[in-house]
Amino acid sequence: MINVIQILLGVSIGIVLWVLLHFKGNLYFSPVSDSGKRNIFILLFVVGFLCRLLFAFDVPAFQSPDEKAHLGYIQYISENKSLPIQPDVFDLDRKDYEYYQPPAYYLAMSMFYTFGNLIKFDELSNIFMIRSISVILWILTFAATWLIIKRLRLESNFSEIFLMAFVGLLPSYMFISTMINNDNLITCLAGIIFLLAIQVKDKISIKDAILMASFAAMSFLTKYTGVLLLVFLVVFIISKVEWKEIKFTGIAPIIIAAFIVVLMLAPMLIRNRELYGSFIPLSVGAHFPNWDSITYGIYRAFKNFLNTFWGVAGRTNDIKFIPAIIVGNIIALIALYGIIKGLFSKDSYAGRFCNNNISFSIASFISVMIGMMILIYYGAKYGHAQGRFIFPLIIPIGIWMAVGFKNVIGERVENTKFILNTVGLFLLSATSFTGYVLSKFIAS
C-alpha cells in the first residue's frame, strides 16, 4: 500500500525546482560563473538537508538496516561502560548481532545516549538525537566534498556539479545517512582523508602522513570497510615517494604512517583474535547462504549491490525506488565505458584528469576496484552485498562516474542546459524518492 499524496507532493516539488532551473538558470544558477555554481551547490545542500530531516524524524524507529542492533550496541556501552562480546549464535531477532563491529562509532554515540538519559530522554528522543548527529556527519561530508572540488583539478563544471549532486542527493545514501549506523561516521572520515590527500603537493610530508594515517586507522576502528581507506593510504603514499633516489627522508612518511596504523589498530585486532579467533571476524556477524553454485552467488551479490546502491530504503532494503535504480545503472554503464575508453588515451578527459591528479587518481581507482571485488566476494560468501558498504568511497566513485560520463558524451556535458537538466534530474529523483519512501511508511 502507498499513500499517493506524499508521492505527488515529492514529484511536484521536484518538477517545480527543475522548472525554476530552466527559467532562472542563466540568471541565478549559471554553472559557468562562480556565483551561479555556488548557488547550485547551496540548492543541492538545502534539498538534501530537508529530505534528510524528513527521513530522520518521520521514518519510524528501527526501519532502516540493522538500526535496532546498532542502537543496542550503543545502549550496552552506555549502561555497562564496557565493550560487548558477540554471542556464539547469530540471531537477527536479537539486537546483539553487531557486537563484533569496531567500537569507535558506538563509543562516540554512547556519550550522547548517556547525556540523553541524564536529561530524561525516552528511547525515541534518543533515537532522533542520534539520527540528527548522522545528518551532521553528512553535512561535514558535503562540506569536505565542496573543499575537494576547490582543490582537485577536475577542470569541468559538469564534473564538479555532478559530484556535489551525487554526494548530496543519491537516494540510497540520502536515506542511510540519516539513520543510526556506523556507515555515516566512516563516510565522513573518508571525506576528510580524501581532502587531506588532495592538499598534498609533490612530496608527502611527515605531517601529512601522520594526519592521513590517523584518520585511516580511525576509519578502520569505525567499520571494517575502513580497509579500503587503508588501501587508499598505502597506494597514495607509495605513489608520492621518489623511488629512483630513495633516502630515509623520502620513506620516513611510509614508516611513520605504518607505525601509527599498527599502534592504533593493535588493541582491537588482538582483542578480536582472542575473542573470535580472527583479526577481522566477519563470519560471526553473518550467515552462510546455500547458493546452488558459486556463479549464482556472485550473480546475486552483484544484483543486490546494484539495486541497493542507487535507490532503496526500509529495514531490509525492501522499499525499492525503481526509477533511480534504472537511471543510476544506465549512467554507471556509460561511465564505466568512458573510464575504460579514457584510460588508453592521454588526450581524453579521463587521461587529462589522471595526469593532473596522478597520485589521487591511482589510489582512488585502485581503492574502488578492490572495494567492488571485496563487496562481491563478501556478498557471494555471506549473502550480504549492500551498496552502503561502499559509501565510504562515494566521493571517488562520484568523481570517476563524472569523468567517465564526460569521456563518452564529450564537451556537450559542459552545455549550460545539459548541466542544469542534470541537476534537475537529481532534484526530481531526491524529492520523488523521499515522497515515495514516506508514503510507504505512512501507509503501513
Image: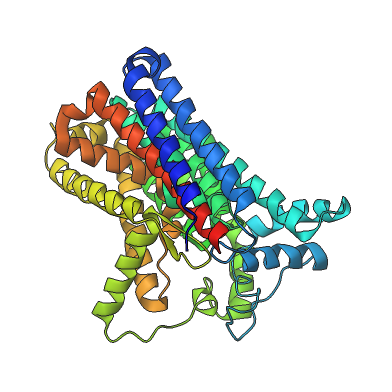
Instruction: Tell me where residue 324 appears, x and y as whole percent.
Output: 34, 50
Above or below — where is 89 with respect to 25?
A: below
Query: How many numbered badges does the structure rendering display?
Result: 0
The picture places residue 107, in percent across and down from the top left corner, at 70, 57
Estimate the x, y position of residue 395 in percent, counting from the top left: 41, 42
Q: Is residue 387 left or right of residue 131?
A: left
* Quarter containing the C terminus: bottom right
Q: Is residue 329 visible?
A: yes
Name the residue located 35 percent from the left edge and 32 percent from the top edge.
423
Report the front residue among 78 and 23: 23
- Residue 424: percent from left, percent from top: 35, 33
Q: Nearer the viewer, residue 226 or 285?
A: 285
Query: What residue is shown at x 72% (from left), y 68% (from top)?
Result: 83
**Vertical position of residue 345 compared to residue 234: above or below:** above
29 relative to 155 in the view: left or right: right
Q: How is the image coloured?
A: rainbow
* Side of 435 relative to 54 (left or right): left
The answer to which quarter of the image holds residue 244 is top left
